[in-house]
Image (tube, rainbow, N blue to C red):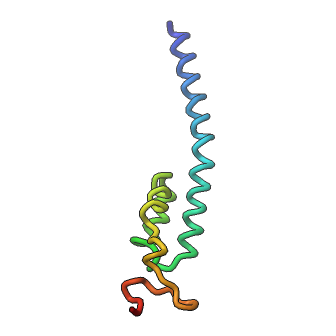
Amino acid sequence: MADTTAADEARKKRNGWKVMAAVLPVHVALAALTWRDLAARDDGEVRGSKRVWRAWSLLNTLGSIAYWSFGRKPRSEVMTLGDVRIHQEFAPR
């Protein structure tokens, strides 16, 4: 009975490493894309603090997913006037 338990524990540990090996590249790729997007955007194009989004995306994969879902302002809210980006609230009418 003890041998079966040790074998089960070894199998669980191997499965844990397999899951980690599958999730880690996804997390790193999403975090890198998030950081690149944050670097390319002005403060007015992001909901909240860029520093907070960077930290949250680094801590877990859900942080990056939340940024892509909620942290970016839609293009309809940000207008461009030549090379200058103007938030819709301040755009001339």
The image position of residue 45, as x and y in percent, is: 46, 76
Q: Is residue 23 above or below residue 87?
A: above
The image position of residue 42, as x and y in percent, is: 50, 80
Q: Name the residue located 46 percent from the left edge and 68 percent from the top edge.
A: 72
Q: Is residue 89 left or right of residue 84?
A: left
Q: Name the residue located 39 percent from the left edge and 92 percent from the top edge.
A: 93
Q: Is residue 26 above or below residue 5?
A: below
Tell me which corner region of the image, top left, top right, bottom left or bottom right, holds residue 76: bottom left
Q: Is residue 28 left or right of residue 92?
A: right
Q: Name the residue located 49 percent from the left edge and 65 percent from the top edge.
A: 54
Q: Name the residue located 60 percent from the left edge and 28 percent from the top edge.
A: 14
Question: How many numbered discs?
Answer: 0
Outermost residue to the front:
93
Outermost residue to the top:
1
Tell me which corner region of the image, top left, top right, bottom left or bottom right, holds residue 46: bottom left
The image position of residue 44, as x and y in percent, is: 44, 80
Outermost residue to the left:
89
Q: Is residue 15 above or below residue 8?
A: below
Front position in the image: 79 or 18:
79
